[in-house]
Image (cartoon, rainbow, N blue to C red):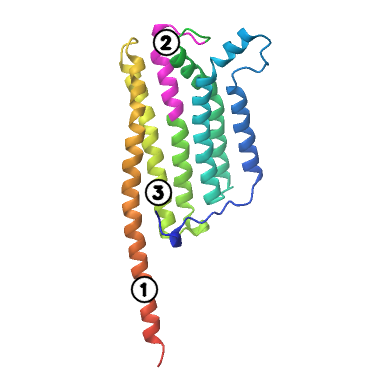
Amino acid sequence: MHNQKYAFRMRGTMPSRLDAFSDVVFGFALTLLVVSLEVPKTFDELMVAMRGFVPFAICFSLLLLIWYSHYRFFRRYGLHDPLTIILNSILLFVTLFYVYPVKFLFSLLIHGGSGDATIRLPDIPRLMIIYGLGYSAIYLLFALLYLHASRMRQQLELTATELLDTRAMAYESFGLMSIGLLSALFASLMRPQRAGLSGFIYILIGPMISVFRNVHGSRRRKLEAQLDREAHMAEEKRSSAVPA
């Protein structure tokens, strides 16, 4: 746990038109994920719709993770400058564009080609490459947003701990991006029969995040201790300067 004295200040507490637009896009993406736009009229149709529950749940969770990362960034920094708007727009575009490929992939994985999603063997590498590049693009854009926030540190009046957190999030986003690129690379090099195994690369996400956050936590605790010492020394210096 971080010292509450050094908690990240929230600069984007007031909703803006950019936030509202982003939420509308995420809401539309969720609409594209729904199992069926029509209410089933028979029990057999209901059972067909229920087959899409697990893929929908997985895709919903992934989209929720992206939304939360987006929400946290704009709550922390409240940036609305032209570059932030451009990066955010590209991020929303990529997220919306990749809704169908992600839904297709997980429908295929859950139902093994026995449902609506079917694929030819030679196309499996391309599907994994499409997913990997989309995943990488999303986290590249998050990394660029955090790097931009780091460059805006004077305007945002970021403290030393906030700047450390900002750079750590940029590095973590680059790490997540590299996992997607690595999976896409493996898919492009493997035979079609084995290209699906490139998806196991994403198992690295958990260990990578754990390592990144443990290292960052250690650095942050050291910085907090240093700032406490400096504040204590400054207080003693002021006290000694006060005439008796």
User: Mark 1 packing: few (<14 Cα in 10 Å), some, or many (20+)?
Assistant: few
Which numbered dot is residue 232? Answer: 1
Residue located 50% across and 40% down the image: 69
Q: Is residue 129 magenta?
A: yes
How far across and how far down the image is residue 191, in percent?
Answer: 31, 11
Horizontal side of 144 relative to 211 (left or right) equals right
The tag earlier along the polypeptide, 2 or 1, is 2
Tell me the CA gap for discs 1 and 3. 27 Å
According to the picture, the residue beneath numbered tag 2 turns out to be 123
Element marked by disc 1: helix
Horizontal side of 63 relative to 166 (left or right) equals right
Residue located 39% across and 7% down the image: 121
Tell me the CA gap for discs 2 and 1. 64 Å
Which numbered dot is residue 209? Answer: none
Nearest the camera: 57 or 33? 57
Which numbered dot is residue 167? Answer: 3
Nearest the camera: 151 or 164? 164
The tag earlier along the polypeptide, 1 or 3, is 3
